[in-house]
Amino acid sequence: MKVKGNHVILSVILIITGFIIALSYQFANEVPKNQVITERQWKKEDELRNQVLFEQSVNRNLAEELRAIQAEITGIEEEIAIQQRTYFNLVEDLDKLRMATGTVGIKGPGIEVTLTDAQYVPDGDNPNFYIVHEFHIQKVIHELLVTQAEAIAINGQRISHRSYIQCVGPVIRIDGNTSFAPFVITAIGDSAKLHDSLHLPGGVRDQLLSDQIEVRIEKKDLIMMDPYLSDRG
């Protein structure tokens, strides 16, 4: 059979038309699929976004709990520090009280004050005017206590807040124990401060000298004292 030109043209048109229809059909089928993938991605992104927001909320809550715990720990540490300072102060006060009452031995720098009867008594004068009396010793002790001496002893005998000094003729009794001149008064504390307090113009040293008492005052690097007699074992 002879193929005419019109038939050829028609065949080409049909082939092209079929190709276009097939391409359109394929395109029509692919568009929904692309749309479905996009929706899935959006849902996935939305889920990730919600998860991030949730994690951020959890982190904020944990941060607030952490700050609360840190504040509680800080409060506990401050309370412990206060208790430690209180305990330290109580121990320090107790040690000072023990030293003041003479119940424990003590050592440290300080001064030594020696009071001696006058070497010369003019003829006809009362010898009692030229010897050391209890009030002379008490003047020295009072000045040393005012100047914050930590501990005091007389002729090596530790005295406490309960001590008493009594003049009995030419001797002095300290808490019932007899002591003779010269009287060596030792005091533990700030040696410079104690020394200067006794040398104030018109002070204790000048008063003792005016009473004809010989006075020697020396700074000491180390003085050792035993406990108060009645508290020894």
Image (spheres, helix red, strand yellow):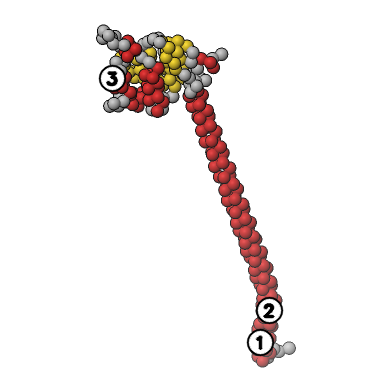
Front tag of 1 and 3: 3
Amino acid type assigned to the residue bearing label 1 in the image? Ile
The CA distance from mark 2 to mark 3 is 131 Å
Circle 3 SS class: helix
Residue on which the image places disc 3: 210
Which amino acid lies under the numbered mark 3 shown in the image of this protein? Ser
Tell me which label, 2 or 3, sits earlier in the chain. Answer: 2
- SS label for mark 2: helix
Q: How crowded is mark 3: few (under 14 residues within 10 Å), some or many (20 or more)?
A: few
- State the mark number for residue 28: 2
Kindly report which numbered mark, 2 or 3, lies closer to the viewer in this rendering: 3
Cα separation between marks 1 and 3 = 150 Å
Q: What residue type is labelled 2?
A: Ala
Please give the name of the residue rendered at 34% of the width and 19% of the height, measured from the top-left corner: 219
| Residue at (56% x, 39% y) in the render | 80
Q: Identify the image quadrant of the C terminus.
A: top right
Q: Are the residues at dot 2 and dot 1 in contact (C-beta closer than 8 Å)?
A: no
Q: In which quarter of the image is residue 87?
A: top right
* The residue positioned farthest toward the right in the image shown: 1
Residue 188 in sight from this viewpoint: yes
**Which is nearer the N-term, disc 2 or disc 1?**
1
Q: Work out whether residue 7 or residue 24 is closer to the camera in this orientation and state it.
A: 24
What is the CA distance from the residue labelled 2 to the residue labelled 1? 22 Å
| In this rendering, position of residue 161 left or right of residue 22 | left
